Amino acid sequence: MGIVPMHAAPLERPVVRIAPRRGWLQLELAELWKYRELLYFFVWRDIKIRYKQTAIGAAWAVLQPFLTMVVFSLFFGALAKIPSQGLPYPVFYYCALLPWMYFASALQNATNTVVEHQRVITKVYFPRLVLPLASVLSGLVDFAIGFLVFLAMMLYYGIVPTRATLLLPVFLLLAVLTALGVGLWLSALNAIYRDVKYVVPFLVQFWMFASPVAYPSALVPERWRWLYALNPMAGVIEGFRWALTGHGQPPGGTLLISAGMVAVAVAGGLIYFQKMEGTIADVV
Amino acid sequence: MSEVVIRAEQLGKRYRIGEREVYRALRHVLGDALKSPLRIFCRATPSYFWALKDVSLEVREGEVLGLIGRNGAGKTTLLKILSRITRPTDGHAEIHGRVGSLLEVGTGFHPELTGRENTYLSGAILGMRKNEIDAKFESIVDFAEIEKFLDTPVKHYSSGMFVRLAFSVAAHLEPDILLVDEVLAVGDIAFQKKCLGKMGDVAHRGRTVIFVSHQMNQIRRLCQRVVWFDAGHIRANGPTAEVVSAYEAAMAAGEITASHRAGLPNEKARFLRWEIVEPRGSQPNVLNYHGPLAIKFIVRVNEPVRDGQHGIALYDSGRQLLWGTAVNHLQLESGIHKFLYSLPTLPLRPGVYSWRVTLFDEQEMLDDWDCAPEFLVATEPVTHWKDEWAGILNIPSRFSVSSMEPVSVFQEKRS
């Protein structure tokens, strides 16, 4: 073709430089921002598929925490008589199960997301960080549905929100970040060692008993509290109980330690995930 | 001369051999550690291979560049680096403009979602903005000819409809630079032509296209310049006619029979070996009998194949296709499988031939094997003793002669 097509020179054409990865952490947040719509589409798809593939759809978001709450109230509450800080057992357990179930499912989804998307990953470029982010965010819809049930329970048990309730978003954010931080590690690891997928259910189970889901953290001996606080979900769950019902202690020091741990987990997760990102398409 | 939009300098990509199997390795890591606890401290020296080495390339705006070469030569690796799917080990590249890559038809499609939903999802994954998809939606649906099924989940689509919609989304991407990997091999002929037309459009509007194909007629029709890859290096880079002829000459000289499969995208299935099971001779790749025969191909399936397609082709030493067939809708569990072909006879002249077998799962290529060893036919030549009159078939024939009297001819006509 001898003729060069005449057309106006594009005003701004993005320039992409491709080179081997150097250094430790290049966050490329601008890149991530450019792909925010893709993040939205992944979240939208996750939710859509989850509710399409199941017979009763969104009802699962209610049934899962609700039935677990019933079981816990019966066995840990009515039978084992675990102290519940003066709260009715259903309330005591439900406000812990809300963040816990969100966390557990977000963690599992984040772990599997890179492997589940291996076809897309090997065929098209986008910031891989979008994947674990999407799986952590899409769980929030289930959380919101479950939360509506809690509102009904508050009415039924006559629980009045206090000013502490305003802090709820902080605890939720902490739960999201914990899931993201740990999820980043696990999703990258799972791409290399498929065994990770089988380890996670156990991890989640042990983690639940290391968190004050089935019991109040007041049961933990004082001198071990600092160790206990290293688990960010301990702060989150105590925080939820306190913020929603006004019972229990405000998790002050615990929360600070938890926040620190979350920061470490997220930073470490980002570094590890980014280290994997450049080669993830070669591995999965 | 228009400006350079892609400049690659000494790109190299190194894979560790067996890296793709790394994900299964935790068990082995632990197992090895148990067997020899000290070994874990001194790492075994891994062996590497370069899928791409020292590749420098410039592409100008509006050019349609073809990449050719046999499987594993590095074409796809280059596309993957340019589209940022994977990072190079060495070298660097600079790209001016928005890149759209089309390495597979239907990337990101989800079977449970409807055609409409998938259009948005796949569009977003390929790099389109939502308002962009909104604006092109009508046109995408028109091109794919699926208006009536827009709100049907794509799992109910025929494979033709699926491919049409998937390609249509991709064809509307309108990037400055389009990278295409052998995706046009799918779909019916009429639709392939439509797609080629669309790609031609893209090129005429001043966009740059890099196009990988094994089909030399497509390359000839679409590309002005061709780069021939061989074992990770650029072997030739020039006008289409010259490079394609050189490539075809080399292939005809038998180079293709080397069984190189290093560049395959995944480890989901591998053909391991092939042999003649009947008649059994002293060597499993030598046929020395004119009658019925059976040939088996052993394939190892690592991940279950849900909707598999398997093709087989028989070539002569000049890479002339002699015979081919394919089966669809194969379902294979993980494990070792035997594909068995029974043929009434294979009347070939003595010589060197080769089998080629492929396995796809839902349009994804799992393996494409130019079988080794080659297929040797050592039957007795029963054709013309002068070679140029022997033809390509070796069919035993019986001949008889009898005299026919005019009367009998007459009678035969009457009866």
Image (tube, coloured by chain):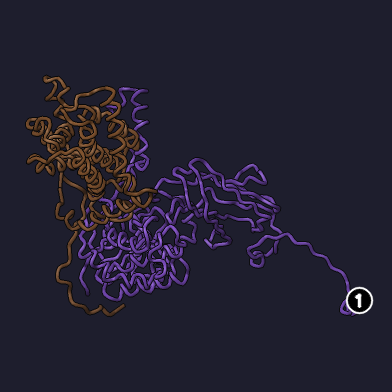
Chain colours: A brown, B purple
* Residue wearing tag 1: B408
Q: Is residue B76 left or right of residue A163?
A: right
Where is A56 relative to A268, above or below?
A: below
User: Crowding at label 1, few (<14), some or many (≥20) Cα neighbours within 10 Å?
Assistant: few
Percent x, y of residue A72 = 28, 30
Where is A102 relative to A224, above or below?
A: below
Where is A27 relative to B37, above or below?
A: below
Q: Is residue B93 left or right of residue B327?
A: left
Quick one: quadrant of the C terminus of chain B? bottom right
Mark 1 residue element: helix
Percent x, y of residue B352 = 57, 54
Using the image, name the chain to which the residue with label 1 belongs. B
Q: Residue at x 13, y 33 (%)?
A: A258
Q: Residue at x 18, y 77 (%)?
A: A8
Q: Residue at x 37, y 23 (%)?
A: B35
The answer to whether one can see residue A6 in this image is: yes
Write down the quadrant of residue A191 in the picture. Answer: top left
Q: How many marks?
A: 1
Percent x, y of residue B130 = 24, 64
The answer to whether one can see residue A278 in this image is: no
Where is A135 relative to B119, above or below?
A: above
Quick one: quadrant of the N terminus of chain B? bottom left
What's the residue type where badge 1 is placed? Ser
Query: Foreground: A120 or A3?
Result: A120
Q: Is residue B253 left or right of residue B101?
A: right
Q: Residue at x 40, y 68 (%)?
A: B219
Percent x, y of residue B100 = 28, 63
Query: Foreground: A78 or B229?
Result: A78
